[in-house]
Image (tube, rainbow, N blue to C red):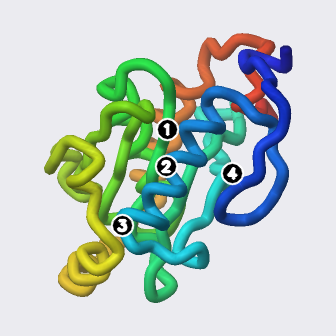
Amino acid sequence: MNGHHLILGEIEDIITGVILPDTHDERYRQNLARFFLEKKGYLPDDIIPRVDLAVAAGDRKAIVKVDFLITLSEKICMIIRYGPGSIVTRRRPSLAASRLVATYQVPVVVVTNGEDVEVIDGSSGTVTSIGFESIPSRKALIKLAENRHFEKISKNKAEMESRIVYIFEVDGVCDCDDSVCML
């Protein structure tokens, strides 16, 4: 055992080829990556896995992970956050993360537990669709991004969103949880 995860061996990342610990959560992440590549038409170069996101709440700082960033035309157009359990509890911190991974609002936020999916409009925070098939394909995301103004996130808003991620993802985390790095 390592942290909260039972290590089942090793698994190769479908996007990068990096060898990772094989956990139940990583299997879900690899299935998600495969889905984006095989069913939604994304290219490996469009997908950035396991992105570190620095967050803070006052003097308290940590690094959390964003599972996937989807970049098209040098803009982050979608983030995907995976977590076991209820996806309802993933909405707000994932929306906040979409306001921190870039200096602009990422238009599409996807939250999933590997079984269920919600697609959220980054600007409004509204759930726009439910289910894997409703995730925008590469072609649909390109079209959506062409019609979007990537509004700038103010320093004050970024600070508030960082606090939200910290509260949901870091505050009260168990010492053995290795998915968060306290700074």
Q: Distance between the residues labelled 3 and 2?
A: 11 Å
Give the labeled residue for mark 2.
Answer: 32
For disc 3, the marked residue is 40
Secondary structure of residue under mark 4: strand
Lateral position of residue 78 relative to residue 168, left or right: left
Q: Around disc 3, counting alpha carbons within 10 Å, would you say few (fewer than 14), some (14 to 19), or many (20 or more)?
A: some
Compared with 13, 83 (above or below) is above
Q: How crowded is mark 2: few (under 14 residues within 10 Å), some or many (20 or more)?
A: many
Q: Do the residues labelled 3 and 4 touch (CB within 8 Å)?
A: no
**How far separated are the C-alphas under marks 1 and 2?**
9 Å
For residue 135, above or below residue 60: below
Dot in front, 4 or 2: 2
Q: As shown in the figure, which amino acid type bears the numbered disc 2?
A: Leu
Q: Earlier in the sequence, mark 4 or mark 2?
A: 2
Query: In front of the other: label 1 or label 4?
Result: 1
- Check disc 1 and report its element: helix, strand or loop: strand
In the rendered view, does 54 fall on the left or right side of 113?
right
Q: Position of residue 182 (x, y in %)?
A: 77, 30
The reply to whether residue 105 is in sight is no
| Disc 3 to disc 4, C-alpha distance | 25 Å
Q: Report which residue position mark 4 lands on.
A: 52
The answer to which of 68 and 181 lies nearer the viewer is 68
- Please identify the quarter of the rendering in which residue 88 is found: top left
Amino acid found under the numbered disc labelled 4: Asp
> Which class describes the residues within 10 Å of circle 4: few (<14), some (14-19), or many (20+)?
some
Which residue lies at the image location 53% right of the left edge and 55% below the top edge? Answer: 33
Asked if 150 appears above or below 105 in the picture, the reply is below
Name the residue tied to disc 1.
82
Picture quadrant of residue 7? top right
